[in-house]
Image: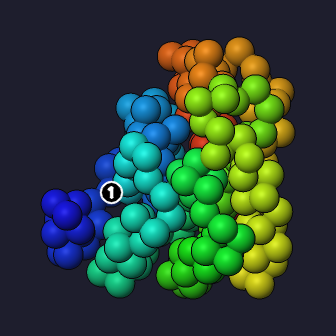
Amino acid sequence: MVLVAALATGCQYVGTSGPRVSFHGDSIGAQADSEIVHRLTRHYRLFRHSVERADITSMLPSIRTMVENGPRPDVAIVELGAGDAFERHGHERMRRDIRRALDLLRGVPCVRWFSLKLAGVDGYYQGYVERADDFNRILARQITDYPNARVAPYRPWAHAHPGAFKPDGLHHTERGKTAFAHFVESVAGRCP
């Protein structure tokens, strides 16, 4: 609620030069926030909003406020879906919520949405384990309707960096947070 009120007057970007990048994430992004800020503010103006245990629906108000009150980002990076998988949201809800977010971001020139990691996630996250692959398939199908958006290859990145994860298999170690922030920066850098 506080963030939405703060956004009512416009987005607060950190960094002084370069294209505007927004990052919208769940616990994975929230736990790597300082590393993301460190990496991206060297070349970008960064707005970020990441919340522990967030799902897409819970992040829609801040995305809406950002695009309506501006300034709009040049690049939007979305790291959401883990909470939706964990809560075992159904296919229709996932499809609807992905589209709602992408509809809000339609005016952003470059949108990149991270796929979900599949292998090596602890059974504590049983809903995630059961639904992550479904989420990735739904995301891949829905994103084709949005010419400004693409799936960012977090799943293959995670597979190639198994040492970046804590024993839960979902969240990053300290070194993993740094590597993740570098991946976020590389995704932003591949936008036209």
Task: Examine the image and state in which quarter residue 45 appears.
Answer: bottom left
Q: Nearer the viewer, residue 68 or 83?
A: 83
Q: Position of residue 13 (x, y in %)?
A: 32, 57
Q: Amino acid at mark 1?
A: Tyr
Residue visible at 60% across and 23% down in the picture: 168
Q: Which residue is mark 1?
A: 13
The colour scheme used to paint the residues is: rainbow
Residue visible at 48% across and 51% down in the picture: 25
Q: Position of residue 35 (x, y in %)?
A: 45, 30
Tally the numbered discs: 1
Vertical placement of residue 80 versus 65, above or below: above
- Quadrant where the image shows the C terminus: bottom right
Residue visible at 30% across and 80% down in the picture: 69
Vertical placement of residue 144 versus 110, above or below: below
**Would residue 135 be found to the left or right of residue 87 on screen?**
right
Residue 41 in sight here: no
**Would residue 74 be found to the left or right of residue 145 on screen?**
left
Task: Categorize mark 1 by other alpha carbons within 10 Å: few (<14), some (14-19), many (20+).
Answer: some
Q: Position of residue 112 (x, y in %)?
A: 66, 61
Residue 11 in sight here: yes
Residue visible at 60% across and 36% down in the picture: 125
